[in-house]
Image: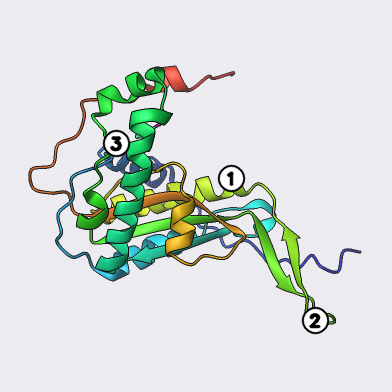
């Protein structure tokens, strides 16, 4: 017998077919209005919206339920400035030297460059870290030991998806920003050796004059393959 397996009845609310369709359509319509935003207002955001989004992210499934994530929430202006300066330094090198012509061409329709004023303007930065492995103290020896983590990339990716959905649902704008390399984030934020920066997400209200690139999402028949 597996003595470690403890179970309980599933709490599950069965919706009527009408409710299922209505909520599914509403959610789709709402998510179709999400846009990645690069022009942020400095207007403050209620902290609970951020906390609820992080708590929502924390409901994500993860490999062996190890929940290999840390969400660092920054509103401190000095730290935001430090992050902006370090990110821009890396991005400048990337845009001028590291990124291939093919990559720059792929990004051209998005209108991005190395300037990242949103890293100071957005009221919150959420820096998501992936815990490449866990750390525990051996009670007998007092030594630090590593715990193997499974599927951390997939787990953190799913959690970030839920985070973005929650923030959008709460009427906030986000930018999924991956300055590369991102090691400076662990340094500035004093994160332990097992944590790797995964994505940096400015969160706030869009600036009143915010613009977004004209892009289209692939239609359903291009992204779904159906065998019936
Ligand atoms: N990290 C850079 C470049 C960049 C890369 C991709 I792929 C994008 O979809 C957008 C930007 C930047 O943030 O500017």
- Residue 1 is marked as none
Locate residue 53: give its quadrant: bottom left
Kindly give the residue lying farthest to the left in the view shown: 209
Q: Is mark 2 within 8 Å of ligand 1?
A: no
| Count of labels in the image | 3
Of 178 and 66, which appears nearest the observer?
178
Pointer 3 local density, CA inside 10 Å: few below 14, some 14–19, many at least 20: few
The answer to whether one can see residue 143 in this image is yes
For label 3, the SS is loop
Q: Are marks 1 and 3 in contact (CB under 8 Å)?
A: no
Which residue position is annotated with label 2? 139
Residue 160, placed above or below residue 212: below
- Residue 32 is marked as 3
Locate residue 222: give its quadrant: top left
Residue 52 left/right relative to 75: right
Residue visible at 44% across and 56% down in the picture: 185
Percent position of residue 156, x then y: 54, 50
Quadrant holding the C terminus: top right
Of 165 and 112, which appears nearest the observer?
112
Locate residue 121: give its quadrant: bottom left
The nearer-to-camera label among 2 and 3 is 2
Residue visible at 48% across and 59% down in the picture: 186
Label 2 and label 3: CA atoms lie apart by 51 Å
For label 2, the SS is loop
Percent position of residue 102, x then y: 40, 17
Which residue position is annotated with label 1? 153
Quadrant holding the N terminus: bottom right
């Amino acid at each position: 017998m597996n003595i470690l397996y403890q179970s309980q009845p599933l709490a599950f609310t069965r919706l009527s077919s009408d409710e299922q369709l209505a909520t599914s359509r509403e959610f789709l319509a709402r998510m179709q209005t999400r846009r990645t935003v690069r022009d942020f207002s400095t207007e403050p955001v209620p902290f609970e919206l951020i906390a609820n989004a992080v708590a929502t992210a924390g409901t994500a499934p993860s490999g062996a339920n190890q929940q290999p994530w840390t969400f660092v929430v920054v509103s401190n202006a000095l730290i935001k400035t430090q992050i902006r300066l370090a990110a821009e330094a890396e991005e400048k090198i990337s845009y001028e030297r590291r990124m291939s012509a093919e990559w720059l061409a792929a990004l051209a329709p998005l209108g991005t460059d190395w300037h990242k004023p949103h890293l100071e303007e957005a009221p919150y930065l959420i820096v998501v870290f992936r815990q490449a492995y866990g750390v525990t103290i051996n009670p007998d020896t007092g030594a630090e030991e590593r715990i193997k983590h499974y599927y951390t990339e997939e787990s953190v990716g799913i959690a970030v998806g839920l985070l973005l959905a929650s923030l959008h649902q709460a009427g906030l704008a986000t930018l999924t920003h991956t300055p590369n390399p991102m090691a400076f984030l662990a340094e500035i934020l004093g994160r332990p050796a097992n944590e790797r920066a995964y994505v940096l997400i400015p969160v706030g209200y869009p600036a009143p004059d915010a613009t977004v690139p004209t892009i289209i999402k692939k239609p359903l028949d291009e992204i779904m393959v159906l065998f019936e």
